[in-house]
Amino acid sequence: MNGLATAPCANELVRQAQRCRDMGSPFIASVLEAADRQLHRAPLTAAKVWNWPEDPAAAAVALRVNGALHALARRGSPPYLAELYRREHDDFDGAVAAAFARADGFIADWIRHPTQTNEVARAAAIASALIAAPLSRSMPFELLELGSSCGLNLNLARYAYQLGTVSVGGPLSTVRIAPEWRGPPPPFRPLSVAAARGVDLQPLNASDPRDRERLLSFVWTDQPARLRRLEDALQIAVEHPPRVDRGQAVTWLADRLAEPQPAGRCRAVVHTMVMQYLGAAERQQVAAMMARAGERASADRPLLWIGFEWTSDRRAVELRLTCWPTGSSVALAHCHPYGDWLEWLGPTAA
């Protein structure tokens, strides 16, 4: 190894490997551990990883590296890496070393860009928050999503959900999401979305083969159910293209909140695993804007703020709902980062 190995980010691959193993992905854990041992074979990539200027965990640096390796494996180059991903051998170090040696430039360029998971299973948490919102009466929702990526979760009303004993969504949908439900079921309300719009710095297009490949590469290869669900959601997005604007979240949100809200429609600002990519000042701006918009809310024009985000200590993923005009805020659930399970803490049908 070289002197860069003592940099603060040097153990990020190992830390994320353990997290992957804890979440039931031993293959990805082994890939990342091999990447940590072999990273010196890719000097361009190593320089970026070991000298990452910000919090490497918040930036998901290790998952960027994993996404690059998965992308190479899906392309079949180098062949020894592709064979590893097809489980034709278990020489993790040899396969990862070959990839680093042959594709250093590709990997270094890939990790410059944020992860683009757009995890569809997280839509179950957002749907749970929508139907649990304490509205004065049932009304359709207007979704405004920050960090939409490909916009797959803007199509959440087109998916079918089993939330404990509660079934909502489109019963005939090819995308069926049934997280392991812990605790009592949420209260039931019909899930109706009248409008949905999102923003992303680099929005992806479900109809673009390159964008589809980028999304698929960020799915952990030892979780085939996630891959199938993503492929089905991408097909729905081709048939029903979500509206995702290219832009900066704070500016875009200010413009959307300034637009008139029809009576009898609930406006809901939602985001999943996005706040970690915003600076502290931007997060404060979002909170201030939501509070000001909340002052204009009424029972006939309610406003929701739904976040699926890590807690400040990164020990848990919390589903939080803030409602106006009351301004009440509650942690509805603790969740698996990719939506595999949900521990419900919020209001119930009873």
Image (spheres, rainbow, N blue to C red):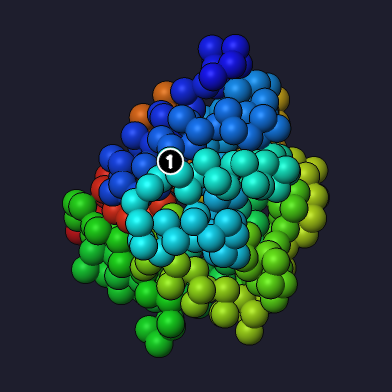
Q: Quadrant of residue 294?
A: top right
On the image, the x and y values in percent for residue 245 come to: 77, 59
Q: Check the image and report above or below for 230 versus 328.
A: below
On the image, the x and y values in percent for residue 70 come to: 53, 55
Is residue 266 visible in this depiction of the protein? no
Give the total number of marks visible in the rendering.
1
- Which residue is pictured at 69% across the width and 76% down the height? 207
Q: Check the image and report above or below for 30 versus 122.
A: above
Between 278 and 81, the one lying in front of the other is 81
Q: Check the image and report above or below for 290 versus 264.
A: above
Amino acid carrying label 1: it is Asp
Q: Using a 10 Å C-alpha cutoff, classify the residue at mark 1 as few (fewer than 14 neighbours), some (14 to 19) or many (20 or more).
A: some
- Which residue is pictured at 24% across the width and 57% down the height? 181
Q: Secondary structure at mark 1?
A: helix
- Residue lying at the far bottom of the rendered structure: 172
Is residue 246 visible in this depiction of the protein? yes
Please state if 18 lies on the left or on the right of 180 as rendered.
right
On the image, the x and y values in percent for residue 310 come to: 45, 36
- Which residue is pictured at 63% across the width and 84% down the height? 239
Between 16 and 140, the one lying in front of the other is 16
Residue at the disc numbered 1: 93
Q: Specify the quadrant that holds the N terminus.
A: top right
On the image, the x and y values in percent for residue 233 come to: 52, 73
Q: Specify the quadrant that holds the C terminus.
A: bottom left
Q: Quadrant of residue 113?
A: top right
